[in-house]
Image (cartoon, helix red, strand yellow):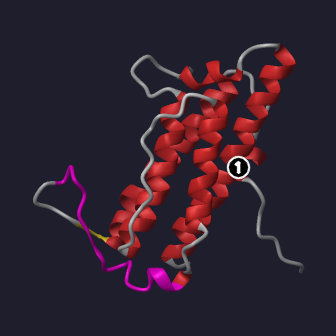
Amino acid sequence: MNSYEASVHQFAKMLTSLDKWLEASVSLAQKKSFDPNTLLSARLAPDQYPLVRQVQSCCDSAKFAAARLTGKEAPKHPDTEQTMDEIRARVRAVVAHLGTFKTADFAESATRRIDLPWLEGKHLVGSDYLMEMAIPNFYFHVTTAYAILRHNGVEIGKTDFIGGLSTKDR
């Protein structure tokens, strides 16, 4: 598996699933007669980001990983989303952005020097950044978003989290 498949391909798949979970949360709100936007402030613990920030972090993790690994510019998002429609639009925008990348863009990613703002005076090589930071950070936020929605009664399960599989005929 190359860096493209491990990052962009999987990030786009999971963000697409996240959008479906958010859609399911809107359906739940309609069924139970409450404002779906109230879920954006839900969190699992008082010192943890609310759902809206978890989703923003998923998007940021994905777009910045792709940018850092390829040397391309990431789109800017000002973190101003306040509605389910706005946060879902951001998810879809990041999925569309990830769709602009090709496997060839990642040709030098394993050895690319990755400078992170909070690691002053230090850097990671691309392969270490991808495996030790980018992927775990993305999954931390996407899993937490899933857990917040699930905790609040959104009817999603393990198959919704995993998404479609690339099955082959025998």
Looking at the magenta stretch, what is its main secondary structure?
loop
* 87 in magenta: no
Callout 1, which amino acid? Ser
**Foreground residue among 100 and 118:** 100
How many labels sit on residues? 1
Image-based side of 31 in relation to 87, left or right: right
Query: Does any portion of residue 169 appear in the rendered image?
Result: yes
Question: Depth check: 51 or 160 in front?
Answer: 51
The answer to which quarter of the image holds residue 94 is bottom right
Q: Which residue is mark 1?
A: 17
The magenta-colored residue range is 104-119
Residue sitting at 40 percent across and 66 percent down?
67
Q: Is residue 16 above or below residue 98?
A: above
Left or right of 146? Residue 77 is: left
Q: Residue furthest left?
A: 121
Query: Which residue reaches farthest top?
Result: 33
Residue at image x 45%, y 52%? 61
The residue located at (23%, 63%) in the rendering is: 115
Q: Residue at x 60, y 28 (%)?
A: 148
Q: Nearer the viewer, residue 51 or 169?
A: 51
Residue 96, percent across and down? 62, 62
- Using the image, determine if residue 92 lies above or below residue 167: above
Is residue 114 magenta-colored? Answer: yes
Q: Is residue 30 left or right of residue 1?
A: right
